[in-house]
Image (spheres, grey):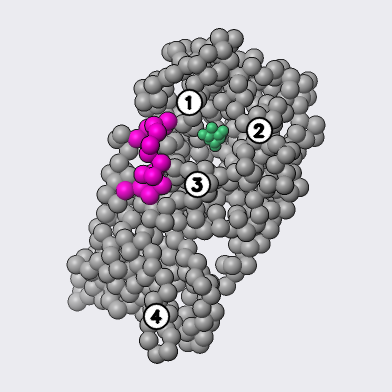
Amino acid sequence: MKKSFLFLFTLLLILNLQITVNGQPVAPPKALGPVPTARQLAWHEMEQYAFIHFTTNTFTGKEWGYGDESPEVFNPSSIDVNQWVRVVKAAGLKAIVLTCKHHDGFCLWPSKFTDHSVKNSKWKNGKGNVVKMVADACHKNGLKFGVYLSPWDRNRSDYGSESYIEYYRNQLKELFAQYGPVFEMWFDGANGGDGYYGGAKEKRKINAASYYNWSTTLNLVRKMEPEIIFFSDAGPDIRWCGNESGFAGETNWATINTDSIYAGKSGIEKLLNSGQEDGTKYVPAEVDVSIRPGWFYHAEEDSKVKTPEKLFEIYLTSVGRGSNLILNIPPDRRGLFHENDVKALLGWRKLINEAFRTNLASLAEVKADTHRGNSPKYAASNVTDNNKESYWTTDDELTTGSLVIDFKSKKTIKYVMLQEYIKLGQRVKNFAISVWKDDKWDEISRGTTIGYKKIVKLNSTNTERVRITILASKASPVISNIGIY
Ligand code: FUL
């Protein structure tokens, strides 16, 4: 009994010494707001997932159905959602967000609030339900499931009036009650104007800032699914990256002032792409892009599937810039991912695996010019300890600092990966990467923001030492992870 008490006492003393200086604990840096919520942190860690666009457009060849399509045209000949799930997982994607209803208004589940759905299609004699199939297959196979329900509806006669908002909310209730858990809800900002609208065939203009009364709708969904992540141009949880070509800004702040930004507002693309250094809300960007030129499957685009190399480049400009990537893969008229898309996805995964197979930093010695309070709790070695909760940081007065990663022998390096400990807020404004060459430091790259993750592609270099210098930061830099490949 006595012995074990002594052991415990000694252990506590050692632990205490490690985080104290002169008996005083060295306090961590204060959070620099705005900071991510727990659900935003969990979302960051997903990094990449699939988008699936599937509706009558797949069978009519359109991108935006007018809303007058007969439900009968929806008739996949040999749908296999397990193939979707297998390929999505093999590609390293963590979830599927499905277009349960696109702008044409056709519903992939037999909604009781409309006849414009799978229940009036030829497919499975109207007994099929794509949403259920996909949600079940995701949940059974360890993928998360997300919902896209287009606010703009070119089929509904009451689009533009109050009753449509009721309809839209009823459908959300239906979806969340039956097919959850749902990790992300995608609110599309498109409001193109003209449509079928129950036969009216006219142009309708809504006020995107007020018509949908989003706060009521989001509260309703949040009550059903507290951990949901809401995507829209302006958040509230994650924002659009401002383009559909696959890149977040090289400077990419997760923070932004959302007060005057709302879904459908034009002219905000640049702002969404870079975020704002002094933004008042934490709303990181999501990069949405399709593996093909269109969002829906068109046979004539079979030869235009993005190559593994192009997808790898997109990976670097999305995940490698602290955003998440939502990569669209549209099923064909059989209801399968086309062979060309499958090949591209698997080739892409191979490129990622090869590029990031060996982290040279994990076995290297890491030293910093300074660390907070001289406490080992904030030492340089924390950036390679594989623990996302530990970090290197400096005293509060400092907003610069450098870390040297020493391999002890020459290595060929191609990528540097950096991560800030964003629980304390995004901070770094500028950094530089140097390598030891001819007995001195040679700067080979400069960057701006880091955030959740930054991957820097280098011209392949041979060196035994790499130096990461934080040149400017909003407050003491807090770096949790460094990888060198
Ligand atoms: C856009 C839509 O108009 C496209 O059809 C597609 O759904 C894309 C993801 O969002 O705003």
- As drawn, 406 above or below 63: below
> Residue 59, position in %: x, y?
72, 28
- Seen from this angle, which residue lies furthest right? 77
Q: Residue at x 42, y 62 (%)?
A: 419
Identify which amino acid the numbered label 2 is placed on.
Phe
Mark 3 packing: few (<14 Cα in 10 Å), some, or many (20+)? many
> Which residue is denoted by mark 4 in the rendering?
442
Mark 2 packing: few (<14 Cα in 10 Å), some, or many (20+)? many
Identify which amino acid the numbered label 4 is placed on.
Asp
| Secondary structure, magenta segment, majority class | loop
Identify which amino acid the numbered label 1 is placed on.
Asn
- Point out the frontmost of discs 1 and 2: 1
Judged from the image, the secondary structure of the residue bearing numbered disc 4 is: strand
Of the image marks 1 and 2, the number of the one nearer the N terminus: 2
In three-dimensional space, the C-alpha distance between marks 2 and 4, rounded to whole angstroms, equals 51 Å
Q: Range of the magenta residues?
A: 261-276
> Which residue is denoted by mark 2 in the rendering?
54
- As drawn, 475 above or below 243: below
Q: Which mark is residue 191?
A: 1
